[in-house]
Amino acid sequence: MAIKSRPIYNGFDLEMPAQRHIFVLEGEGALALLEKVNPSHPMLGQSEILYSPVGSSHEQAIVKLNAANFFTAPSSEILLNRFAAILSTATMSTRLYAAGTEGFIGAAVNVAARYGVKSASIVKEHRGSLRRRVQCVHCKGFNSDITASPFHCEHCKLYLFVRDHFSTRLNAFQGVCVNAEEPHLFPEPVELYQ
Amino acid sequence: MDLKFTTETYRDDFSFRNSPEAIRRYPFPFHADSYMYAINMEDHVAGKPGTAYEHPIDVDEHYISEMADRALVLKEDPLRCQALSHMMTAQWDTLELLMIHQSIAYPDLFTLERDKDKCHWINRPLGIDDKFIFGDRSTLPYEPMEYIMRQSQGDFCIVDQRDNSLWMDAGMVTCQADWSLDFDIGMSFMEWHAPVPMAHELGIFDRALKFLMNVQQGRPARRLNWTMTVNPRLDTSPENYHKWGSEKTTVTKENIGAKLHLRCELQSFWRLPRSNALLFPIRQYLISLNDIATIPKWACRMHRVLKTIPDPLAEYKGFSRNRQLAIDFFAPFDNGQETTKGADPE
């Protein structure tokens, strides 16, 4: 069942009109664009593509698209910094696209929010791992790349289960102590978010 | 009303008690012998004298002790009080509404004098006497929402209304039933209710949202919600769940009457005049099973409600572990006879 607090990732639609298109792609998120776009598509002449490989190898394929601008970032953090710089001078009729893992999309959405862009207006596609970013509700620390529940909070060490509740503002799911009622019990972790 | 404030604690030695008067005025949440989710909204109009509905913002014998517990929670965790920056107008609306209603209902306890934007607020139970300029946050020791919510019983949310939804954009939440303002702040109505089972499928939230978006100024609404809590602990927050969770396993056949508490929330909904936001006071009332058992009709009804509540609901409300013990506790009070209509004690 859908998690009501989780954003909806509708997938890339490249046919929406705009003067300028900005793509932020992380890892396998590059395929969200590559699988849909025809290299002769006129939008590419108005497109800037920012790509952070994180282990994927789609650089050559993106180069062949011959977009107006293309940047391969050595890390997602650097990609998002450049994304912020672009947004700081962006004008009306700029359309934003984000694809990759959920944590990456959420981080891009939050960068855009700083420049007054609403999440609903950003075209999103979830690609790659289902791993989750989780905030410990007890110590408020963030845990990245969580694939199993329960897990030990890297900050306060409490044993947390991942509640199906997502905060866009924090870009994280909620982690809650799984054995608060019976602290001597440690249920086996289950790989849920590979 | 002659209010005698009690000095009591909601943690450590748990000295919280209800007087016989407090028991009789308890807002018992069960109007019939079974329970299922319902929006159960009604106009928040003045109720009978001597009930928790007599005044729109209720102040009771626990006022001073509840405010002391709130101060302790805020000292440990300031994130229990947050307001997004666009909510400042709504903060002032809230301060005004709570000051007006408390001072009209309880003139012996609270006084608000106003000369245009010059205000003089006196809170006698807490020994507060402040003059401030309405709209000028530098003239108060806290932001206006925090200032007045440190002097008002219950949790409060202020929700903004825009884009066809309500948004959890400010609040003071120190005595909540397992939800986190810090996590939920900024969420839309459907988002912050995401973890609630069954109600989405029943269409409850669609209807509730429609209703709430149409609440008019001067015509507040209310509903009751409830859960069970082990020990009279106000701060049953997720933040501190690892500290209080193990108390749930301490209930026995012998101690359940004193230890397990029904926790009723009287939620009211107020349209605010300048901001068009909504104020949600969530006022909670605790009562031990022993105290419920002093009212035969309530004890009988508790037995029937607890027996028939669906499992996912008991789980969500966090008392499935102690449910059977509670059913057994109330079984001797169920005489098999029909109970009278409504939630009144008789």
Image (cartoon, rainbow, N blue to C red):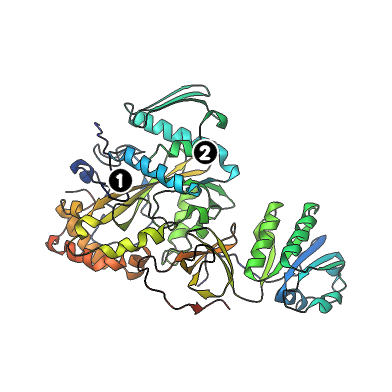
Task: Point out the frontmost of discs 2 and 1.
Answer: 1
Report the amino acid beneath label 1.
Thr
Q: In the picture shown, does residue B302 fall above or below A152? A: above
Is residue A33 toward the left or the right of residue B197 in the image?
Answer: right
Q: Position of residue B195 (x, y in %)?
A: 46, 64
Chain for mark 1? B
Are dots 2 and 1 in contact, CB under 8 Å?
no
Q: Position of residue B27 (x, y in %)?
A: 28, 48
Q: Which residue is mark 1?
A: B9
Count residues near mark 2 (Cα–Cα under 10 Å), then give few for <14, some for 14-19, many for 20+.
many
Q: Position of residue B201 (x, y in %)?
A: 44, 67
Towards the viewer: B31 or B315 = B315
Q: Which residue is mark 2?
A: B91
Q: Secondary structure at mark 1?
A: loop
Residue positioned 23% across, 38% down in the render: B50
Towards the viewer: B31 or A71 = A71
Q: In the picture shown, does residue A136 fall above or below B117? A: below
Q: Are the residues flagged by discs 2 and 1 from a single subunit?
A: yes
Count residues near mark 1 (Cα–Cα under 10 Å), then give few for <14, some for 14-19, many for 20+.
some
Lower sequence index among marks 2 and 1: 1
Q: Which mark is residue B302?
A: none
Image quarter hosting the N terminus of chain B: top left
Mark 2–mark 1 Cα distance, whole angstroms, equals: 29 Å
Chain for mark 2? B
Residue positioned 66% across, 62% down in the render: A107
Is residue B4 toward the left or the right of residue B316 in the image?
Answer: left
